[in-house]
Image: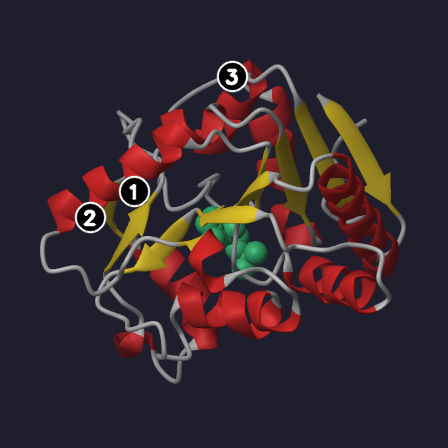
Amino acid sequence: MDIRIFESAEKLDLHAAEWFSELINQKPGAVLGLATGSTPIGIYAKLVEQHRSGKVSFAEVTTYNLDEYVGLTPDNDQSYAYYMNQHLFSHVDIPPGNVHLPDGMALDPAAECARYDALLAEHAADVQLLGLGHNGHIGFNEPDEQLSSGTHVVALKEETRQANARFFSSLDEVPKAAYTMGVGSILKAKQILLVVRGSDKAGIVKEALTGPVTTQVPASLLQLHPNVIVLLDQEAGRLLS
Ligand code: F6R
């Protein structure tokens, strides 16, 4: 694993955005696996700046997001489709048909999982961007005795709902289920870019990167991938020696 620790959020964001721009400039038709949450917001902002200054074009890029809440429409401001438009897609030149997320409003969840998996099987991601949950989740693959390989619907753990409640007006409004790519799909990406910020995640960073590989810490499975870059701020990396 290639672990890079940054002294400020600004430097981490810039490094990640430049890394993405370089990848896209080398391969204009790159396939990007993307994430939501608070972690990538600054990276997307820098990518938008780089696009505006002519340093990168998304005209041929295709994207696949990790996850989406069940039951939220794309125009619901808490949906991940809305988030992606707000932070990235509506500010760059990516064709709308090139962006993909699970459809939170699909009537047949099993068919929706199969549809998403078929797309992922056809288009291997050049990179999968990941954040890290406090309990070690990646996407919405929560700690468990077993993990699923493909796209599936998960019941969100109470701790994850509580962590995400900050984005909603009350805990009651946080959906109870979400679609997520499975760990098999995540691990199929050619490269993984795991980004973690904040002192509150220092413990889980250490566990995920240096502890045993276990389904109880889904991010620990990243230790099995041959090409992982980890970007940390100093706080998140403080327990790594
Ligand atoms: C988001 C996702 C989640 C988050 C994780 C960290 O698409 O799949 O796994 O990356 O919950 O969230 P933040 O960045 O809000 O701390």
Which residue is pictured at 62% across the width and 27% down the height?
A: 191
* Residues under numbered marks 2 and 1 in contact, where contact means CB atoms less than 8 Å apart: yes
Residue marked by disc 3: 212
Residue marked by disc 2: 112
Looking at numbered disc 1 in the image, what kind of residue is underneath it?
A: Tyr
C-alpha span from label 2 to label 3: 33 Å
Q: Can the viewer see residue 238 in this picture?
A: no
Looking at numbered disc 3 in the image, what kind of residue is underneath it?
A: Pro
Q: Residue 173 location in percent, x, y?
A: 28, 77
Which residue is pictured at 48% across the width and 29% down the height?
A: 124
Please give left or right for residue 234 compared with residue 135 in the image.
right
Are there few (<14), some (14-19), or many (20+) residues within 10 Å of tag 3? few
Between residues 88 and 160, which one lies in front from this camera angle? Answer: 88
Q: Quadrant of the C terminus?
A: top right
Question: Does 42 appear above or below 35?
Answer: below
Q: Secondary structure at mark 1?
A: helix
